[in-house]
Amino acid sequence: MAISQVRPRRKVTGSRYKDLRKKKQFELGRDPTLTKIGEKNKKLIRIMSGKYKEITLVADTINVIDSKSKKSMQAKIKTVVENPANRHFVRRNILTKGTIVETDKGKVKITSRPGQEGNLNGILVSQ
């Protein structure tokens, strides 16, 4: 069955809304990307108006900004340390926004959305 982003069929009280129409294509959603650690792999997805979105499926490097020295650099990702989205993502090494990863430069907090964007950015937390 298709993933839909429309309102639910039932109200908070438990009564039903009347169906006004069927599902429309622009209301469809998609499965979460669940970006993992490994050799870089990206995918193009067609979105509305015919444009394309580049999503990251697998990544091994991250663009890091050091807030103290105001310098940016690239770092190699080793493993996931903490993930506020889901505690089970830590052992599966899944990258989401807010995840803290261990890199060769130190611990980094991911600030971009890897499942929605084609790059992986982060801020250095500790060295």
Image: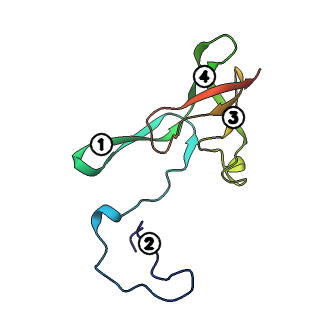
Q: Amino acid at mark 1?
A: Tyr
**Circle on res. 11:** none
Earlier in the chain: of badge 4 and badge 2, it is: 2
Residue 105 at what x, y percent from top left? Answer: 70, 20
Distance of mark 2 from mark 3, alpha carbons? Answer: 36 Å
Count the marks: how many? Answer: 4
Could you tell me the amino acid type at mark 4?
Val
Label 3, residues with CA under 10 Å away: few <14, some 14-19, many ≥20: many
Do tag 4 and tag 2 residues touch (Cβ < 8 Å)?
Answer: no
Instruction: Name the residue rendered at 49%, 51% in the picture.
Output: 33
Q: Position of residue 97 (x, y in %)?
A: 59, 41
Say which amino acid is labelled 2: Arg
Say if 29 sits above or below 65 in the image. below
- Marks 1 and 2: in contact by CB < 8 Å? no
- Which badge, 2 or 3, is on the more N-terminal residue? 2
Residue 101 numbered mark, or none: 3
Circle 3 or circle 4, nearest the eye: 4
Q: How is the image coloured?
A: rainbow
Q: Secondary structure at mark 4?
A: strand
Looking at the rendered image, the quarter that the C terminus falls into is: top right
- The tag on residue 7 is 2
Badge 2 or badge 1: first in the primary sequence = 2
For disc 4, the marked residue is 64
Residue lying farthest to the front in this orientation: 13
Secondary-structure class at tag 3: strand
Q: Single out the mark in the foreground, 2 or 1.
A: 2
Q: Quadrant of residue 125?
A: top right
Q: Residue 109 in the image: x percent, y percent?
A: 67, 33
